[in-house]
Amino acid sequence: GRLVALVVVLVALVGLLVAGATAYAMSNYLRGQVDNSLSANFQRQADQDQTSGQFPGLAPLSPCNTAFGNRGGFGQGQGSLTVRSDCAWVVNGNTATLLTATQLKQVESLPTSSHPQSVEITGLGHYWVIWNGSVAVGASMHDVDNAVRNLVIWELALTLTGVLFAGMVGSELVRRQLRPLREVAATAHEVTGQQLAKGNPSIDIRVAERNTDPET
């Protein structure tokens, strides 16, 4: 029982370590991709904010008018968030929706930094945002969080399966390997039941021939 328990614990520990390392590596990889995309988008938005406040070939963003809502976020991906001095919006499907005052306040409450920061935005969920005090760009982490969560769930399920398999197979293997020892122990137990303390006892109980190999 102790041998099987030890094997099961080792398998569980290895499985959890592999699962944790894989999830960590996957999370870092996906967030790195988001970081690269955000950095490029941030520079573009900052440049536009400092110049004309207008994208080439499009009407000015100030004020955020109804025509803006049909721009689809100017080609940005689903869930992309942008805050500029003239407008603040998030891409929602094929349109761009203005941020509410609460959502904008949550973005502006972040410390200024050139690196992405994690923030929960009401109605939008988990976001990765770069905010320099006047311009912000953000990306929804919904897909990244779901991918990492699903990976962890699958890894835990596989680890549990491995633990159960190790327990069943390990128990059978240990039972088979220790069978000769149990047989020898049973024979020794029979011998102890004989009257050996007096007279001239004859011990005719023997272990089976298969268990007499001195090399085992």
Image (cartoon, rainbow, N blue to C red):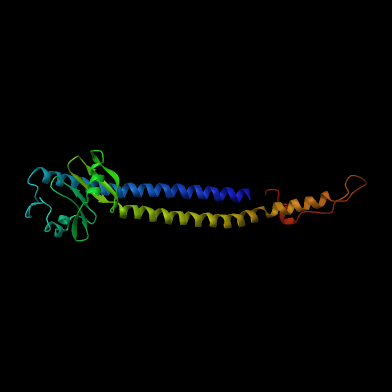
Q: Residue at x 12, y 47 (%)?
A: 86
Of all residues shown, which one is farthest toward the right?
A: 199
Measuring from the top left, give residue 61's x and y in whole percent: 10, 51
Pick the residue in front: 122 or 58: 122
Pick the residue in front: 87 or 139: 87
Of all residues shown, which one is farthest toward the front?
A: 101
Q: Which image quadrant is residue 49 in?
A: top left
Measuring from the top left, give residue 107's x and y in whole percent: 24, 45
Measuring from the top left, give residue 102's x and y in whole percent: 25, 48
Q: Is 179 displayed left or right of 56 in the figure?
A: right
Measuring from the top left, give residue 199's x and y in whole percent: 93, 46
Pick the residue in front: 82 or 3: 82
Q: Is 73 displayed left or right of 58 in the figure?
A: right
Q: Residue at x 45, y 46 (%)?
A: 17
Eyeballing the image, is 95 above or below 133? below
Q: Residue at x 14, y 60 (%)?
A: 70
